[in-house]
């Protein structure tokens, strides 16, 4: 089925244009001023036509969590994510008993192609290979060493599903695990870590390519000890995840990170939990109660426990607070995220790419979405 999107402001990688987008089946085949002839016309009505957002770090949404190992929970997250402009995502696990992580990974492997909202690209394993000193909202009693054997104990036969893993690189055996994963299409990210700058650099040299929710749960940048933050900032091969909800990271610090990383290595994430999209109240993260009030999600001890951010809100914050053009802000949530996972055909409105598209207004409020050429 051939389609053509007309009357939209098309957000390309480097500019915004008022052209028509031609789609054949699941792919974009042409972006031009040519008028449609025999195509089904989709009238964008002056809306922005944007590449769909990609969330590489999200635990849950709409009352469901990745650690609830059912199709219904994955599908709830998928549908709720799409409403925020996310067309692809990595349902993200957390530090829990090995058997629980194994069930979550298997659930994703079995059901990833069945969800009806945003597409599942695979999973992001956040833990259990973390340092207790920077545990954040991750339960320390479930943290174990990052050996290949421990990794395989919960991944089992589903290595192809694991697209990203966060680990503390200072832990014994971490470099062996990074080396093992290097050629397996799994991005290694540094997170919940007490590593020195030198330890972080060793991990990056071994193949780590990302910083997990940069600034949060890692050694900070100081003038004599640059820490993990410093290592993430100065290595051009490393992508920096960023929760841009205005709570986890001050906008001035986010701007400093942007200045060091450049516009092509910053990746917006939500790190959202099951409470995202729901009213204030008491929810869960793992087996821990989480208290949500005034836009913040915290444990009983006051520690931030993920976020309730929507990706379109994070894009809006990037546009309003980081001095970016709208297409540059969108790239942080689409193009950069895709490249961080070596995904070639999503994250950009471009001839030959999948037609994963969202339509939003001047306030970056999502109006409609398309996945692989199908309106949702």
Image (cartoon, rainbow, N blue to C red):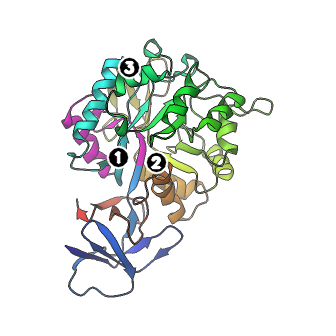
Towards the viewer: 152 or 52 = 152
- Region of the chain picked out in magenta, as a range: 55-84
Q: Which label belongs to residue 96? A: 3
Number of numbered callouts drawn: 3
The residue labelled by disc 1 is: 121
Horizontally, residue 105 falls left or right of residue 337, namely left
Q: Are marks 2 and 1 in contact (CB under 8 Å)?
A: yes
Towards the viewer: 241 or 188 = 188
First along the sequence among labels 2 and 1: 1
Placement of the N terminus among the 4 image quadrants: bottom left
Which residue occupies 35% across, 42% down? Answer: 122
Residue 108: percent from left, percent from top: 28, 36
- Is residue 83 found inside the magenta-colored segment of the image? yes
Towards the viewer: 15 or 45 = 15
Placement of the C terminus among the 4 image quadrants: bottom left
Which residue occupies 67% across, 32% down? Answer: 202
Mark pair 2, 1: CA separation: 9 Å
Q: Is residue 295 above or below residue 18?
A: above
Q: Which element is circle 1 on?
A: loop
First along the sequence among labels 3 and 2: 3
Mark yes or no: residue 125 visible.
yes
The residue labelled by disc 2 is: 341
Which residue occupies 20% across, 85% down? Answer: 38
First along the sequence among labels 3 and 1: 3
């Amino acid at each position: 089925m051939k389609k053509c999107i007309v009357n939209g402001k098309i957000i390309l990688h480097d500019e915004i244009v008022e052209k028509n987008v031609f789609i054949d089946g699941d792919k974009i085949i042409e972006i031009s001023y040519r008028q449609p002839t025999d195509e089904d016309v989709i009238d964008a009505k002056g809306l922005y036509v944007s590449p769909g957002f990609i969330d590489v770090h999200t635990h849950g949404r709409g009352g469901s969590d990745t650690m609830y190992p059912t199709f219904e929970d994955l599908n709830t997250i998928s549908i709720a994510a799409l409403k925020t402009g996310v067309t692809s995502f990595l349902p993200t696990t957390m530090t829990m008993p090995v058997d629980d992580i194994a069930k979550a990974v298997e659930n994703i492997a079995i059901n990833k192609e069945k969800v009806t909202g945003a597409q599942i690209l695979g999973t992001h394993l956040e833990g259990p290979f973390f340092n207790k000193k920077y545990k954040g909202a991750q339960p320390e009693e479930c943290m174990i060493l990052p050996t290949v054997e421990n990794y395989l104990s919960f991944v089992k036969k589903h290595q192809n599903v694991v697209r990203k893993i966060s680990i503390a690189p200072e832990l014994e055996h971490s470099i062996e695990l990074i080396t093992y994963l290097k050629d397996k299409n799994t991005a290694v990210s540094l997170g919940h870590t007490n590593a020195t700058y030198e330890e972080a650099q060793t991990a990056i040299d071994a193949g780590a390519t990302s910083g997990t929710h940069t600034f949060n749960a890692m050694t900070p940048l100081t003038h004599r000890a640059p820490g993990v933050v410093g290592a993430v900032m100065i290595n051009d091969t490393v992508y920096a995840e960023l929760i841009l909800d205005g709570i986890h990271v001050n906008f001035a610090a986010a701007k400093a990170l942007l200045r060091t990383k450049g516009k092509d290595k910053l990746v917006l994430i939500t790190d959202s939990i099951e409470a995202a999209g729901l009213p204030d109240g008491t929810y869960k993260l793992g087996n821990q109660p989480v208290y949500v009030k005034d836009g913040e999600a915290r444990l009983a001890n006051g520690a931030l426990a993920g976020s309730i951010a929507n990706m379109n809100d994070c894009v809006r914050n990037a546009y309003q607070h980081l001095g970016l053009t709208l297409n540059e802000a969108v790239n942080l949530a689409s193009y950069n995220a895709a490249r961080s996972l070596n995904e070639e055909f999503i994250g950009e409105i471009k001839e030959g790419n999948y037609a994963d598209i969202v339509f939003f207004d001047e306030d970056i409020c999502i109006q409609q979405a398309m996945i692989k050429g199908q309106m949702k």
